[in-house]
Image: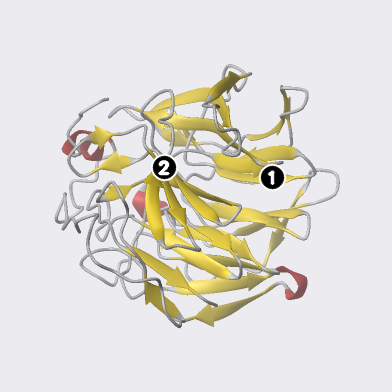
Amino acid sequence: MLRAALAAPCAALACSDAGDVLGDAAPADAAVACPGAGPWAAAPPVRLGATQETAAVALDGRIYVLGGFHIDLGVVPAVQIYDTATCTWSAGPDLPRPVHHVNAAVVDGTIYVVGALADASFEATGAVWAWTPSDPGGGWIERAPMPPGTERGAAVAGAVSGTIVVAGGFRGGAAVADVSQYNPEADEWTRLLDLPRPRDHACGGFVAGTLYVVGGREGTIDSRAGTVYEQGPKGEWITRTPMPTPRGGAGCAVVGDRLIVVGGEGNPATATRVFAEAEAYVAGDDAWEPLAPMPTPRHGMGAAAWDGRLYVPGGATHAGFAAVATHEVLTP
């Protein structure tokens, strides 16, 4: 396991203005009951402790938190599993390599990692790994990697019709506009039409079969965007109503017919530079709705939806690196 200091990647991105670099770590075994009535409720904190720059996916009532920066351990290969029925955490099989800013999606009961960033240097890797949690003897299996020159992390990843689309991302110290499609059955990659602008640390997902890429940035925290790009039927990109709060590093997931976006960084109005805002994009109306703000404003966390609720584990309370184990649940 890589034990790089968190200050190293912060320096690599010139984020020395992040404030409290390490932040306050909540103990992973803190006594917190199942989340109560909303709109926001506290849930048991992240099992491993303060962790940020993770991915999160939902499958069969469980939230899977993949990789990330741990406040004490550096980059980790951990797979942390939250059971929404029992409100308990457990560990899954480690990823083959410690990574952060993971791109992940679920297809037919299998979790796929489709690119990520590695090490304190934020090296882009195109590794593709697959794990089927229902297979009791299974672990992570290597699949066809992203084609050379398209490796990236910090991208939007979503699944539709048995395929995974990866949009935007971060590679070689810059945001990219690449859009790629992975077919797990054929174990093949296809290049799609680029985004109108490079985006990393964006949010997005498929709403009623259509992919939306929301917000993000172009390589720096201060380049936060509020753009909404909709992928058309021929792969073209259509610009829709912008997000009211431009930001990158937010958590998001699709709940019903809405893309819910929470938190993020680049806020010029606060000392932490982190957003508390939660907003919902109603794709059918091309309109945004305000939601109750986060009790603990954060960025750098994966978010996943299950049974009408948005689960937001971990993240950081200051721009840059300030990891916490906080876990909160939104019932929009």
- The x and y percentages for residue 85 are 50, 63
- The x and y percentages for residue 293 are 41, 78
| Position of residue 9 in the picture relative to residue 134 (left or right) | left
Tag 1: amino acid? Ala
Q: How many marks?
A: 2
Question: Along the line of sight, which residue is nearer the eye, 192 or 84?
Answer: 84
Question: Which residue is the extreme one toward the right?
Answer: 234
| Position of residue 30 in the picture relative to residue 208 (left or right) | left
Within-10-Å neighbours for mark 2: few <14, some 14–19, many 20+: many
Assess whether mark 2 and mark 1 are in contact (beta carbons under 8 angstroms).
no
Residue 264 picture quarter: bottom left
Looking at the image, which residue is at 21% across and 36% down?
Answer: 73
Question: Along the line of sight, which residue is nearer the eye, 127 or 47?
Answer: 47
Q: Which mark is residue 275?
A: none
Question: Along the line of sight, which residue is nearer the eye, 214 or 84?
Answer: 84
- The x and y percentages for residue 267 are 33, 65
Looking at the image, which residue is at 47% across and 70% down?
Answer: 245
Q: Which residue is mark 2?
A: 219
Q: Which residue is mark 1?
A: 159
Check the image and report above or below for 80 versus 12: below
- Looking at the figure, which quarter contains the C terminus? bottom right
